[in-house]
Image (spheres, helix red, strand yellow):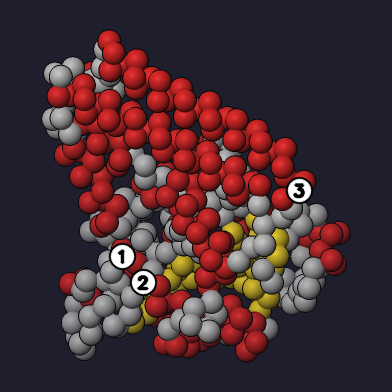
Amino acid sequence: MADDLRGVARLLVRGVTATTDLAEGVHAGILGRPGPAGGSGASTRGIPRIAYQGVRMTANLVGGALDASLARLTPWLGPSAGSSRRDALVAVLNGVLGDHLAASANPLALEARLRVGGRALPLRGEDWPSLPLAPTPRLLVQVHGLCMNHLQWRRQGHDHGERLAAELGYTPVHLHYNSGLSIESNGRTFATLLQQLIQDWPVPVERFAILGHSMGGLVARAAIASALQERQQWLERLDQLVFLGTPHHGAPLERAGHVLQSVLGLTPWTAPFMRLGEVRSAGIQDLRHGLGEDLPLPPGVRAYAVAASLQGVRAGHDHRRLRGDGLVPVRSAFGDHRDPLRALGIPEAHRLLVERTGHLDLLNSHAVYATLRHWLA
């Protein structure tokens, strides 16, 4: 609980100082003193400068004192009660500000861990007996999307992993990670965790599949690239890779955010507001164009893709004209691209397009589950 309070207090102090920076930048622009090349680094002079510096100094002093006091209270406050609402809020916070939280050592920053049954999997295999783990030869690793967590695979009473466990004998393992970090960074960490997982799995692995939703699919692809570079053996055991609404070639909303940020920098009066656009985490900014052509799918691994559209799908209709699921275009979800070198080449038989379905609805769609069951059987 003390760590949660310390994390929130640090963010509040950062909010005060950032707002002060923004106000001073606007003030300097009005006075005709924009930053270098019209950028957002403008500052005032004289009494206004002293006033702004005073606000920042006071905020930092108060924040430091509050942080130290909460640290001393940790033994008396005890652990946080924990709840799905709290976990969801922290996941969103990490998705938006995760790189800042990690760089500033904020207690709210999430550390990537594999989880089983809602509990973190110990890094050493000899500690696994303490968990309610019933390992099977079929291993399914689920990777959540941006601003989400491992608990949100369950939606409206349905969880793809739980159903696959009950009907096909898979053991579901979840990656819980800071989705605000860069996709490349999360991929490297994920690859290291998978290497340890495969080495310590207590029974021989006969089938190994990764199921990624949204950004989770990109993190899985980044992990594969890292494993190829580091020659990690877990990749040799991977059989199947399934993408649910993964923006392989980017998401329009992030591209729109980048354009808006660029437009704000065109004049000295709006340039300070570029800092609002810079709040977007590295993970969000990575969604602008996806991973690019240098991360192809690995040979020997069967890849599948599920795309959704909010529209109805007519027979013979060109899916490239469909709107997508509200966040990810159909073409991007299937990995199609005008440049053949960037297209993922997922076979038509390994694709599913579901109609009148939103991005999050992919997690509880019965049509999606029926196809997953067929693919992973």
Q: Residue at x 21, y 21 (%)?
A: 28
Whether tag 2 and tag 3 are in contact, CB under 8 A, the answer is no
Q: Residue at x 47, y 49 (%)?
A: 180
Residue 127, x across and y down, in percent: 84, 59
- Which badge, 2 or 1, comes first in the chain's sequence? 1
Q: Identify the mark at residue 327; answer none if there is no mark.
A: 1
The answer for how far apart the CA atoms under marks 2 and 1 are is 6 Å
- Which badge, 2 or 3, comes first in the chain's sequence? 3
Whether tag 2 and tag 1 are in contact, CB under 8 A, the answer is yes
Locate residue 258 relative to residue 114 in the image: left or right: left
Residue 298, x across and y down, in percent: 50, 59
Report the amino acid beneath label 1: Leu
Give the secondary structure at mark 1: loop
Q: Quadrant of residue 239?
A: bottom right
Give the secondary structure at mark 2: loop
* Mark nearer the viewer, 3 or 1: 3
Locate residue 223 relative to residue 38 in the image: left or right: right
Report the amino acid beneath label 3: Trp
Q: Identify the mark at residue 76; answer none if there is no mark.
A: 3
Q: Residues within 10 Å of mark 2 (few under 14, many from 20)?
A: many
Report which residue position mark 2 lands on. Answer: 359
Whether tag 3 and tag 1 are in contact, CB under 8 A, the answer is no
- Which badge, 3 or 1, comes first in the chain's sequence? 3
Q: Is residue 322 above or below residue 33?
A: below
Q: Is residue 155 above or below residue 294?
A: below
Residue 59 seen anywhere in this rendered image of the structure: yes
Q: Residue furthest top?
A: 46
* Mark nearer the viewer, 2 or 3: 3
Q: How many marks?
A: 3
Q: Residue at x 67, y 57 (%)?
A: 80
Residue 167, x across and y down, in percent: 62, 89
